[in-house]
Image: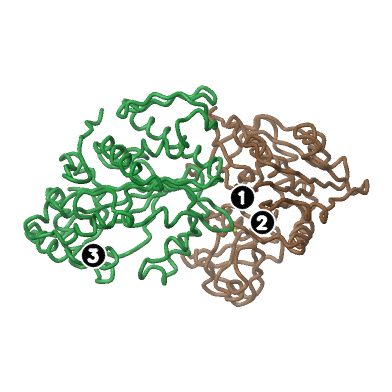
Amino acid sequence: MAIVFRQETFRDDFTYRNSPENIRRFPFPFPDDNYMYSVNMEPHVKGAAGTVFENLIDVDEHYISEMADRALVLKADPLRYQALPHMMQAQWDTLELLMEQQAAGYPEHFTLEKNGDRWRWINRPLGIDDTFTFGDLTTLPMEPLEYISRQTQGDITIVDQRDNNLWMDAGMVTTQADWSLDFDVGMNFMEWHGPVPLAHQQGVFERALKFLLNMQLGKPIRRYNWTMTINPRLDTSPENYPKWGKDRTTVTPENVGDKVHLRVEVQTLWRLPRSNALLFVIRCYLMNMSELVTVPKWANRFHRVLGSLPTELVDYKGITRYRDVTVEWLSKYDDGAPTSAGTFPD
Amino acid sequence: MSQTDFSVRVASVTPVAETIKRFRFERVDGEALPIFSGGAHIVVSMKDGSVTRRNAYSLMSDPADPSGYEISVAKAEESRGGSVFMHEKVKVGDVLTISAPVNLFSPDWRGRKHILIAGGIGITPFMSMMAQFDKAGVAFELHYAVRERARGAYLEDLVARYGSARVKTYVSEEGTRIPLEDILTRQPLGTHLYVCGPDRLIAGVLDAGRDAGWPDYNLHAEHFLTPPPGKPFSVELTRSGKTVAVGEHESILEALEAAGVDAPYLCRGGACGQCETGVAACEGILLHNDLFLSDDEKASGKKIMICVSRFEGQRVALEL
Ligand code: FES
């Protein structure tokens, strides 16, 4: 079924909204009424129709507007795209994977025709029809990673594997919750995961690193992360802090429903074939509180999760200023009933 | 069968030298195999009567060619069955199961130039690497030593394909040896060196590299560790409640698989860390043979790599 793409903004007048159907496919990340930090990794396999896992690279109604927002971010700050020279092979790997997955999942919107190394890529939502030679840089208008990440929802980073470590050596980062590619590029796994409270002591990250180093071709995995954002702003990067930092002081009991957003990142991780690098696709989903409470189970559960969040995590996620007012607002929608198992709507 | 295993038919078996055969595998369903990266290996599962043998072999075919995979198998002198089985039993048309490629010997793509040093059958991972370097226009130099010409696989082929400027061969029986010192001292900054072959060659090259002032992270080695034999023993498994006997020529991992206990693995050679297993109880000594655990971890007696390590003593219990 063809997606009806919305025209909307992630800045200034913030017209971003979710349709009722899109709300129900939101990747609500809390399996339980109590919150506990964990490195939650699971195999990235196809899920049920009507969920964001229907296809391995998810395209939704926000696609065109997100790509337009990315173009604006890049125009203002070209350093949001960076790739070290040795990552060229991994860039081609990434282009292939993202084209193949989008064409397989949404044949009415994307088509990839391969004739040996001569490829034709049709992206109907963005009006692109390009023929190029796979592996030949001169046949594309820009580097392969920049090209395909201007046509894929989510931030994309490519991590090189060497010396028993992972190195963030290429990426397109324009929708990131408070971290910076410019700051992290060239860093290894332990360095870029530096400031996470609680988890590090548990050795969670050492285990995660070993797991990632041994990730296999054809067995992608996924994990969730979440935070909250005021206004549906995709670009909450440190570089952009002067613009969004003050948003946090604007929440009142009257505007919680519209302004406060649950922000969920679904990260999918893939071993790349030619380069042996790892691809991280970090997809951001936003839903405001008024939309969230249209699903009664989520209204109950999110009220309880947010209310029971340990103080250090509240601070770490940067939601201290408006957590209480949001919990108070949500309490009107919590009917006290037990919630059903799993994360999906009833 | 997991989603990353493939059912393949043996498309050809080619003798390439004394005691070395090349096997080509193509998918039974006619589909493409995954494209891979130079230096990768696969694990081949062979049904030998009631026993399933699993051996890891480096892929030597062009990584960009998904129509089939090729490996070369040397018949080991004291073989534990796998290579003898491949040599004596496996014929064209047979169906085997192979894993998706795994790469524990990937080139460092930052390298301005890559020096490859191979001894004997250690040539195989470099064959896929060179195909990739050649296509990408990356500078490389192969130094390939064999004991005797009759046992040297692909000596002439490689010179013909890449030219004598990039491929140098040495035959110890004929008195030619790899001029290590010379190679190590005349490389441009940013050169990476890779070695694969017998333990003695690897140790010698790594030592010489360090002596010549090469940084550790520019030196790479792939060891072909095969599980060493030893006295039989048995292991208790705390989760499944089973007790499994491990024979003289069998690893713990193989004994578990034969007993129907699933344990994770990738390399089956003590390098990747995937088969790390907790030790719940140990009255005796753990014989650590792996390259993965640190000396402290080995000394702690809390972990064992079950693909290569063994046990001697009264009783050992594993968290499986
Ligand atoms: S399977 Fe790789 S170390 Fe045991």
Q: Is residue A251 visible?
A: yes
> What percent of the width, then of the height, locates residue B88?
75, 39
First reached walking from the N terminus: tag 2 or tag 1: 1
Spot occupied by residue B76 in the image (x, y as percentages of width and height): 77, 49
Does the numbered disc 1 mark a residue whose Cβ is under 8 Å from ligand 1?
no
Mark 2 vs 1: CB contact within 8 A: yes
Q: Which residue is mark 3?
A: A34
User: Secondary structure beneath disc 2?
Assistant: helix
In this rendering, the answer to whether B61 lies above or below A81 is above
Q: Which chain is green?
A: A
Q: Image quarter for residue B33?
A: top right
Would you call the spot at circle 2 few (<14 residues within 10 Å), some (14-19), or many (20 or more)? some
Say if A114 sits above or below B89 in the image.
above
Question: Alpha carbon of mark 2 to alpha carbon of mark 1: how far?
Answer: 8 Å
Instruction: Name the residue type under label 2.
Output: Asn
Q: Are marks 1 and 3 on the same chain?
A: no
Disc 1 target residue: B108
Q: Which residue is mark 2?
A: B218
Q: Secondary structure at mark 1?
A: loop
CB under 8 Å between discs 1 and 3: no
